[in-house]
Image (cartoon, rainbow, N blue to C red):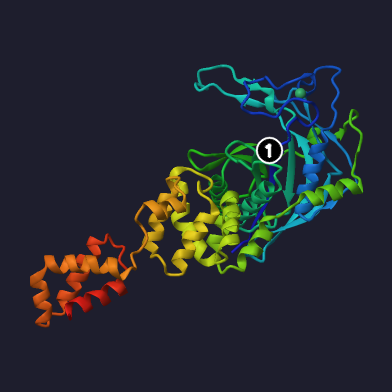
Amino acid sequence: MDKVIIGLEIHAQLNTKTKMFCKCKVDFSSPPNSNICPTCLGLPGALPSLNEKVILYALMIAKALNCEINRKSLFHRKNYFYPDLPKGYQISQYDIPLAKEGFLKLPYSEKVVRIIRVHIEEDAGKLVHPEDIMEANYSYVDYNRAGVPLVEIVTYPDMNSPDEAVKYLEELREILIYLGVSTGNMEEGALRCDANVSIEGHNRCEVKNMNSFRSIKRALEYEINRHFELISRGEKIIQETRHFNESDGKTYSMRGKEEAEDYRYFPDPDLPPIIISEELINEAKSNIKELPNDIREKLKNFSLSENEIETLVSMNELRNFFFEVLKTFPEPRVVANFLLTDVLGTLNEKNLSKPPFSPADFGKAVSMFFSKEISSKILKRIIELLFECKNLDYIINNENILPITSKDEIRKIVLEVLKENMKVKEDYKKGKERALTFLIGQAMAKGKGRLNPEILKEVLLEELNR
Ligand SMILES: [Zn+2]
């Protein structure tokens, strides 16, 4: 079968406090056009001045993606007209990007996706279309987003299936979140993905407007099938840009593919070259704490499944909780058993990101199960009670939940049961084995399941054979 070839271009919004070339706030909860100034509106005479955090964040990304840093890079103007671009050009990077030639290794796979370049550029504003778009003859424009910093990450066409493309994007998103430089939220547009798709030996198409992992998979699958169908009919694939339509799952031709010449790129005369010092590179490196792969390596020692590891990799607060629990009760396998089933289930139900109880309480409860002091049923009940914001001491002292192991207490219950079931006692004496099971059941019910079964049987036999 002919080989599928996919390359991705990712735009990630950096979560700096202010915009890339002015002091306007980056805040998408503000009313439309409230975070704007002459610079990000492109008014005459306004001059850009670079936010240094943008460089630092972009360097962190470049380093995490194993890129080579260009010690001197340039800002270029990319010229085109669109109503969301007030200046008539976007400040971007062209022939000398901030960084180049990196790679990202996909987890649980031998696959390495090579990175062509990492560069910085400013975002455009946002067009807001009225709901009755067919009737209305206008659109709104909101410039709060104009000038917000973006990092663009371009890969080589190294992915060979929609699944690989999604895996790459998931891992890249995780890295951005670990670095703390972007929210990675695709639904809110903080992470955007365009894909170049082709079948080996044929023209490629660029697919845009994929707003979730699911839509990326659907769009790529649709587009690949479309190419195969055209090829099988002997038709030529037209190189073009296509728009993915979420509602019918198809891609539609938007326009012929632009070439770089169309944008009349030239160096921005208002901005000096970006010079990267050794200190800044070191600062970027030291800002990189742990990456998803470091966490995976740590978790691999705990005999957890791939699914369990990925749950902990992606849920920061739950993972921190897990490591805190291990400090008081270092049995990762058994901690994970209850944390990733009962606790996680309830977190999802209640829409919480981390347990409302202390790691130490949870660790103590799991350790009681581990040392066979309590059954898994009692542990599960304790977890429920912990979620009701009770602490473990309170639960143990007030909830009558712990097993009864005292022979005297158990004997009291056994005697009551025997008194109420004189006939069954006689049956047992006549040799009916099943009578014993019945009496144990009665005693367990009376003790609300808390009686230690071995001691119960022992005491019951003592009383029956007396
Ligand atoms: Zn501004």
On the rendered image, what quadrant is the N terminus found in? bottom right
Horizontal side of residue 450 vs 357, given as left or right? left
Secondary structure of the residue carrying tag 1 is strand
On the rendered image, what quadrant is the C terminus found in? bottom left
Q: Does residue 219 sit above or below 413 in this rendering? A: above
Horizontal side of residue 123 vs 461, given as left or right? right
* Residue 91: quarter of image: top right
Percent position (x, y) of residue 330?
Answer: 57, 65
Figure quarter occupied by ligand 1: top right
Q: Nearer the viewer, residue 123 or 49?
A: 49
Residue plotted at (55% across, 65% down):
332
Percent position (x, y) of residue 386?
Answer: 44, 50
Q: Label 1, on which residue?
A: 256
Question: Disc 1 marks which amino acid?
Answer: Gly
* Residue 236 visible (yes or no): yes
Percent position (x, y) of residue 391?
Answer: 47, 49
Horizontal side of residue 124 vs 305, given as left or right? right
Horizontal side of residue 157 vs 426, given as left or right? right
Q: Does residue 76 sit above or below 424 in this rendering? A: above
Q: Nearer the viewer, residue 356 or 458?
A: 458
Residue plotted at (15% across, 69% down):
418
Mark 1 CB lies closer than 8 A to ligand 1: no
Q: Does residue 12 sit above or below 401 in this rendering? A: above
* Residue 423: quarter of image: bottom left
Residue plotted at (87% across, 45% down):
280
Residue plotted at (84% across, 47% down):
283
Q: Nearer the viewer, residue 137 or 339?
A: 339
* Residue 18: quarter of image: top right
